[in-house]
Image (spheres, rainbow, N blue to C red):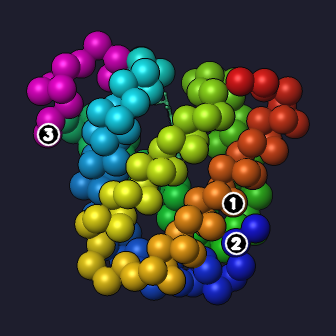
């Protein structure tokens, strides 16, 4: 598990994402769909859209904002807020039917986008972000196990 210091280290660079969750979320989702085209098929709202239709798309921006805000909530809870993750695991397993591997894929994309776009995100903060995202994924996996969702 990531330490409290690691959450703090990440949060000390997180202000741009907090200030503009839609823009960063949009980049993350676009990059996710580019890196792993299968992932787009898991979103009923976006599955039929072309790359062009995903540009400046208010729905995609809105959903990106939702994802980044939820991730920020997780960071601010220092990983101790289990309810947030449990609810997220429940909806993603039962309702959206997202195989757990996609949480690793999106974590890698988030890491890449944050390091690329946020000024000053140095090696210590990078290590902290990796660990925090790893904790997120691991805990989601544990809730998936509890729910008996095998994918
Ligand atoms: Mn995801 C909805 C957060 C990763 C597919 N996601 C939501 C919602 C939140 C959310 C919040 C809205 C409330 C809810 O349904 O629980 N999602 C996240 C976060 C991550 C994430 C914080 C990781 C970081 N989500 C993913 C991944 C996929 C995915 C990975 C698929 C590859 N999510 C969905 C789908 C919905 C959703 C599909 C439903 C969207 C809609 O139709 O409104």
Contact between labelled residues 3 and 1, with CB atoms less than 8 Å apart: no
Give residue 37's position: percent from left, percent from top: 36, 24
What residue sits right under mark 1 in the picture?
A: 135
Earlier in the chain: of badge 2 and badge 1, it is: 2
* Quadrant of the image containing the N terminus: bottom right
Distance (Cα) linking label 1 and label 3: 32 Å
Contact between labelled residues 1 and 2, with CB atoms less than 8 Å apart: yes
Ligand 1 within 8 Å of disc 2? The answer is no
Give the total number of marks visible in the rendering: 3
Q: Verify whether residue 148 appears in magenta.
A: no
Earlier in the chain: of badge 3 and badge 2, it is: 2
- Which numbered disc, 1 or 3, marks the residue closer to the eye? 1
* Quadrant of the image containing the C terminus: top right
Ligand 1 within 8 Å of disc 1? The answer is no
Q: Which span of residues is magenta-colored?
A: 44-56
**Is residue 111 rendered to the left or right of residue 57?**
right
Q: What element carries label 2?
A: loop
What residue sits right under mark 3 in the picture?
A: 56
Mark 2 Cα within 10 Å, few/some/many (few <14, many 20+)? some
Mark 1 Cα within 10 Å, few/some/many (few <14, many 20+)? some
Distance (Cα) linking label 3 and label 2: 35 Å
Q: What element carries label 3?
A: loop
Give residue 76's position: percent from left, percent from top: 58, 73
Give residue 127's position: percent from left, percent from top: 54, 74
Is residue 112 at all visible to an observer of this figure?
yes
Give residue 21's position: percent from left, percent from top: 33, 59
What residue sits right under mark 2 in the picture?
A: 2
Mark 3 Cα within 10 Å, few/some/many (few <14, many 20+)? few
Our reading of the magenta stretch's main secondary structure is loop
């Amino acid at each position: 598990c990531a330490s409290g210091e690691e959450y703090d280290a990440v949060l000390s660079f997180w202000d741009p994402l907090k200030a503009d969750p839609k823009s960063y979320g949009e980049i993350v989702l676009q990059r996710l769909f580019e890196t792993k085209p299968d992932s787009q098929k898991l979103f009923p709202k976006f599955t039929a859209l072309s790359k062009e239709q995903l540009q400046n798309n208010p729905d995609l921006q809105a959903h990106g904002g939702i994802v980044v805000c939820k991730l920020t909530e997780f960071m601010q809870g220092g990983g101790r807020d289990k309810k947030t993750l449990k609810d997220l695991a429940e909806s993603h397993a039962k309702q959206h039917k997202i195989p757990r591997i996609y949480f690793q894929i999106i974590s890698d994309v988030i890491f890449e986008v944050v390091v690329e776009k946020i000024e000053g995100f140095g090696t210590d903060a990078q290590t902290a972000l990796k660990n925090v995202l790893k904790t997120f994924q691991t805990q989601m996996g544990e809730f998936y196990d509890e729910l008996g969702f095998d994918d």
